[in-house]
Image: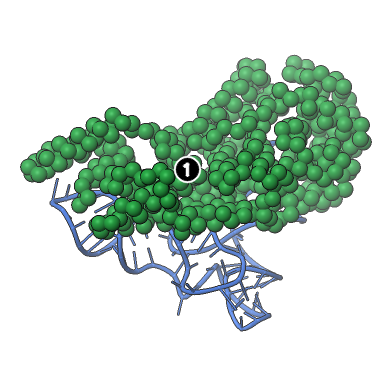
Amino acid sequence: MPAVRLYDTLTRQTVTLQPRDPDRVSIYTCGLTPQGAAHVGHMRGAVFFDVVRRWLEELGYEVAFVQNFTDIDDKIIRRSSEEGIEPAEVAKKYVQLYLEDLKLLGVRPAKWVYVTENMDAIIEMVQKLVEGGHAYVAEGDVYFRVESMPEYGKLSHRRLNDMQAGARIDVDERKEHPMDFALWKAAKQGEPSWDSPWGPGRPGWHIECSALSLKELGPNFDIHAGGVDLVFPHHENEIAQSEAYLGRPEFARIWMHWGAVRLAERKMSKSEGNVLAARQAVETFGSGAVRLFLLSTGYRSPIEYSDERVAEAKQALARVHASLDRARQVFGDPDPAGPKSDAHVANFSQAMSEDFNTPGAIAALHGVIGELNDLLADGAEDRAGRASELVRTAEWMMGILGFEADQEGDFGQLTTELMRLIVGWRNEMRRERLYAFADRVRDDLKEVGIVLEDSVEGTTWRRS
RNA sequence: GGCGCGGUACCCAAGUGGCUAAGGGAAGGGUCUGCAAAACCCUCAUUCAGCGGUUCGAAUCCGCUCCGCGCCUCCA
């Protein structure tokens, strides 16, 4: 197996993964603020990192995978007044919906952590920053002093001086420097709050991810990830406050960022108003199609959402399923302990380990399917062994890409038996030249989502 | 204004110094077939936005130009 190489935003280089602990990879990805239905953009990182985990595990690593929910913040409070329910209920509701969406897409559970359940760790961190001179208190708020970190800007590769020119938001007079950011915010009347040394309040954005990642994974964990739109200011601020807290530059070793999903040539974003609920896409095209669509572009490039493209993905996936179904029906189920095709496995592995090149990995899968189809069309006698290898190889790849066999709904033993009977009856009709009747059977089955295909190998069936 | 990313066939998309520029979708022709579908075979970029340069050799490196996008404010 090739070494895993990945692109690091911090150094702007592709580096070889050398985990802090040789057999264990620790990953923290910034989750979301649950304040609305998850859109397709939210699913990109989730699906991608689901594949990352599966691949690292395939390589033999144990993977610690942590994702947070920022379940208290300004937007949740705003949403709360809009919906007329408590902030905690808002968060709970949208976390629930998000988790359901992940399940629909076949994303495995992470270790999920919540801000509201970790106030102690957050307050402790803020306190230490204040004590160390990296933060200051102003009327119940606490701000991080960016000028206390000379390397501030190293992740997003910008300098404080360059940014001042563009900063045109109303600068809070209480801030020493315009780029200083809130670690703790004093509660206003009626807002949810937690007690702290600076009075009742809540954490600012950014601090939760530092506190939670360090608490769950410890200093120098391997990979910190998120969408590109988090590079600045979120991740930049995380680095600054974490390194200030630790007293040394040992926060995360590698920073990975996935590109934005776009809709109508703009970033899919709630504030832009151009969002498509993830669930809607899944309901229209199926989970597998959405998943394949999201993996069909390299994770760092932006990807443009369109129904046409997801429909294409659905078509491509159907071809894969059709081939595998046919092979199983013609050759029987492959030996689960049998060999895989080394050459195809190598193609796939090479792509996956080179910064998780999922389009390349998908191409490798198509390579297997192409050979399997050739074999099915060939008609030679001694094909079963090779076919078994290819089916195993393809299914192994499908598993790593997260296309579970039962994701689209398993037909089950009974359906399989029934279909064998129906196909048998229909073939008798055809032998008797009762074509009108046979065609009707085929048409009727199509209505319920089952496609019959007649070939020299016999009749096979699959779901549409 | 600052920082950054990208422009590869009809569409999507890999490839970032060297065998004939992956793969998918769409399209056209053919084989097979009761029909349909699928599958298979063939066709589909002498060329990688444009112009210069470096090199024995570039889609890949450098410079300029044009176009699109992201961040700099909440964002996955």
Subunit of mark 1?
A
Image vertical order of residue A69 relative to residue A461, above or below: above
Tell me where residue A58 appears, x and y as whole percent. Answer: 55, 45
Tell me where residue B6 appears, x and y as whole percent. Answer: 60, 59
Where on the picture, by quarter, is residue A244?
top right
Tell me where residue B24 appears, x and y as whole percent. Answer: 40, 54
Give the chain letter for blue: B
For the residue labelled by badge 1, is the local secondary structure a helix, a strand or a loop?
helix
Query: Which residue carries the number 1 mark?
Result: A399
Tell me where residue A319 appears, x and y as whole percent. Answer: 36, 49
Residue drawn where x is 15% and y is 41% of the image: A427
Farthest residue to the front: give it. A337
Whether residue A315 is visible? no
Where on the picture, by quarter, is residue A87?
top right
The one nearer the camera, A90 or A300, is A300
Residue drawn where x is 87% and y is 48% of the image: A150
Q: What residue type is labelled 1?
A: Gly
A390 left or right, relative to A35: left
Image vertical order of residue A308 relative to residue A193, above or below: below
Q: Chain A is drawn in which colour?
A: green
Whether residue A145 is visible? yes
Quadrant where the C terminus of chain A sits is top left
The one nearer the camera, A161 or A31, is A31
Image vertical order of residue A9 relative to residue A84, above or below: below
Quadrant where the N terminus of chain A sits is bottom right
